[in-house]
Amino acid sequence: MTGADARIRISEIFGPTIQGEGVLIGQPTVFVRTGGCDYRCGWCDTLHAVDSAYRDEWKPMSVEAIWAEVERLSGGVPLTVSLSGGNPAIQPLGPLIEHGNRRGYRFALETQGSIAKGWFENLDTLVLSPKPPSSGMETDWHALQNCLDMAASKPQTVLKIVVFDDADYAFARHAAARFPHLPVYLQPGNHTPPPPDDDEAVVDIDGVMDRMLWLVGKVTEDRWFAARVLPQLHVLLWGNRRGV
């Protein structure tokens, strides 16, 4: 199937809640989380949308079915729809974005920048989140540039990089130097991801905040005043629970 008839693998749809991180932090949002990813980061906190062991839980849905759920959750009041994963760029999301845009909804998408799609230019916000050394993955900078080319400077585009240690921090500095025109958001790494089906997930908040303080110290000591350091607000509020 192609175009509007294509099915999109959905892990979960939830909200409205707030966007918990990055450039849209605090903004009311409905999340459409797709299933499947071409990466497997060592510290992934959304394995239920990444690991193929959960693929039986990913529901193939039409644009109309997804949109019916988005409108039910939002009460038909336009807001931002955050497309996440996994890597949502794997899925045929173009028709969904066009459908929502006609109804006044805005779209934000976060991806590691490994897969470029022409429909990126129809987004309102594109968050490129290349994965640092602590993830165990390796960034293809040419692929990330292809994502920028596809976006064609139309959506608001930013870099968001998770930082666990000095090597990750050096990676973030390198990424910022490669793309000096992009705003940079740094996010302290999230300690000890819980099992994905654990509704009572407990996060090492003290560890996260210690890393936050360390990261703030790094950017101020280095006079890296263009970087923005933000926590995962949703983790501070709810831990790593699904659906919030």
Image (spheres, grey):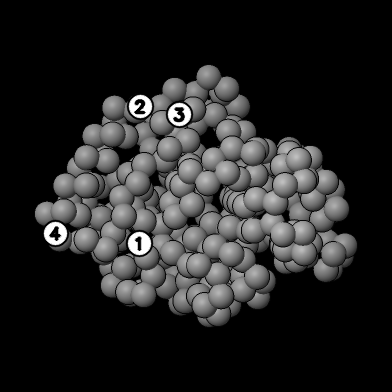
Q: CA distance from mark 3 to mark 1?
A: 24 Å
- Looking at the rendered structure, which numbered label has been put on residue 57? none
- Looking at the rendered structure, which numbered label has been put on residue 237? 3
Q: CA distance from mark 1 to mark 4?
A: 15 Å
Residue 230 vertical placement versus 118 (above, below): above
Give the residue type at disc 2: Asp
Marks 2 and 3, the one that precedes in the sequence:
2
The residue sitting at 54% across, 57% down in the picture is 110
In the image, 148 versus 135, the foreground residue is: 148
Q: CA distance from mark 2 to mark 4?
A: 27 Å
Residue 187 locus on image (x, y percent):
35, 48
**In-image side of 190 versus 116 (left or right):** left
Residue 9 locus on image (x, y percent):
74, 50
Give the residue type at disc 4: Asp
Whether residue 16 can be seen here? yes
Which numbered disc, 2 or 4, marks the residue closer to the eye?
A: 4
Residue 199 vertical placement versus 180 (above, below): above
Q: CA distance from mark 2 to mark 3?
A: 12 Å
**Quadrant into which the C terminus falls:** top right
Whether residue 194 can be seen here? no
Marks 2 and 1, the one that precedes in the sequence:
1
- Looking at the rendered structure, which numbered label has been put on residue 204? 2
In the image, 76 versus 199, the foreground residue is: 76
The residue sitting at 49% across, 31% down in the picture is 240
Q: Which residue is mark 1?
A: 184
| Local crowd size for mark 2, using a 10 Å CA cut-off: few (<14), some (14–19), many (≥20) | some
Question: Dots 2 and 4: beta carbons under 8 Å?
Answer: no
* Element class at badge 4: loop
Residue 94 locus on image (x, y percent):
72, 66
Q: CA distance from mark 4 to mark 3?
A: 30 Å
| Local crowd size for mark 4, using a 10 Å CA cut-off: few (<14), some (14–19), many (≥20) | few
* Element class at badge 1: strand
